[in-house]
Image (cartoon, rainbow, N blue to C red):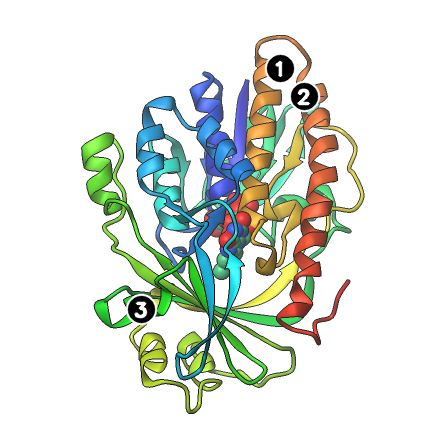
Amino acid sequence: MRVAVVGAGLGGLALAQGLRGAGIEADVYERDPGIVARFQGYRLVLNPVGFQAVRDCLPTRWHPLLDEIVMEATAEQLILDTQLNEIGKLGAGRTGLVVDRQVLRHLLLTGLSVHTDSALTGYDVLADGRVRARFAHRDPATADLLVGADGISSAVRAELSPRTVPTDTGVRFVIGRTPLTDEFAELSKAYGSKIAGDGISLLLGAMRFRTPPKQAAEQLAPEVTLPDIGDYVRWAMILPPNGSLADLTAQDAVLSRMQGWHPRLRALIEQADPDNSTLLSIRVVQPGERWPSGPVTLLGDAIHATSPTGGNGANTALRDADLLRRNLIEAHEGHRTLLAAVDAYERQMFDYAAEAVHDSLEKLPAFAPEAKLL
Ligand SMILES: Cc1cc2nc3c(=O)[nH]c(=O)nc-3n(C[C@H](O)[C@H](O)[C@H](O)COP(=O)(O)OP(=O)(O)OC[C@H]3O[C@@H](n4cnc5c(N)ncnc54)[C@H](O)[C@@H]3O)c2cc1C
């Protein structure tokens, strides 16, 4: 069996790792010219389901390294005013483990056959039941199964399920990171802090590695190369619709809402790493109609993009990868046909994915009451 995975995000890479571990040939085709081509590094909270899924996709010899690059996310969260006085507690943080997306992505990439600069432009289902994928800058590739793990603007989805399209909630999300120096350590000493401004909040969360990732890999799995990054504070602000942000950088968009705030908070944003700070529109994809069963399927944001307020997009993409992997292994071992395996995956995935998108949207009004809900 040969599987072509389109998209080297968390979902596509986890699937490819899991298939590789089972002796199934899997090639990954990524649009970006390189793996670190743009903003990629932010802190994610993996819930127990997402963490177990990614663990199960990885070879067991890398489990100690995976355990070393995550941090517990169960400490309390503080509410501070804009002058840094404590005014309340949010209770326990979300249960799970905090991980840096870019670090996890590097671990997932190790040993895989990843073709960069390979944007999928379309595909054809062949008479023999296989599928041929077409790319902008490389020759077509033929596989038994094509998996669109190509994110919210999925080119695979555009052909497979053209009526499933992203919806813009109108809400903007600004996120960035700043090296965790002594100056900023107090700001997010617990799992995270919420700075409550006038109608707007700044959310802070520290990423503190047990061991710096590069060093952890050198000690625990020398065949893995992880990025040389240190601890940081992740900051995020949700901006309501209709605000004028034209031509503002991510940092300036946040600073423009922080007039009169404590100088240390403003310094945190001013000293951010611009390559890892960005301004995004919150768009969602709701899984609607099922497509006829065939040698093409979707996973992750390509079929169920959630609002970041749900904190469940990566978790759900990883759950998909593990579920599809398990079904494909059964087909590979002759226990069922490939199409039956894909159908079983899609039936389960559609159920929990719709719930994940719904949950994430339910949490959005707490941050942006004016959001256009779907
Ligand atoms: C700021 C932020 C914070 C978040 N925090 C959390 C969190 O705490 N917890 C959580 O669970 N989720 C979180 N999420 C959501 C999570 O990051 C995503 O849901 C998850 O990364 C989706 O993974 P994916 O593999 O489906 O897609 P992606 O990571 O989007 O990967 C898709 C890949 O496909 C490539 N691609 C696109 N088009 C093509 C093409 N035509 N051909 C080839 N390749 C293509 C892209 O370049 C990309 O590399 C957050 C998201 C953001 C933006």
Q: Quadrant of the C terminus?
A: bottom right
Which residue type carries mark 3? Answer: Glu
Question: According to the image, label 3 marks what residue?
Answer: 186
Residue 216 seen in the current view: yes
Q: Is residue 284 left or right of residue 248?
A: right
Q: Is residue 282 left or right of residue 30?
A: right
Q: Residues within 10 Å of mark 1 (few under 14, many from 20)?
A: some
Query: Do labels 2 and 1 touch, CB within 8 Å?
Result: yes
Q: Image height check: is 89 above or below 163?
A: below
Indicate the amino acid at tag 2.
Ala
Mark nearer the N terminus (3 vs 2): 3
Q: In this view of the protein, which residue sits in the foreground, 372 or 69? A: 69
Q: Which residue is mark 2?
A: 341
Q: Looking at the image, can residue 136 be seen? A: no
Q: Pointer 1: what residue? A: 331
Distance from label 1 to label 3 (Cα)?
52 Å
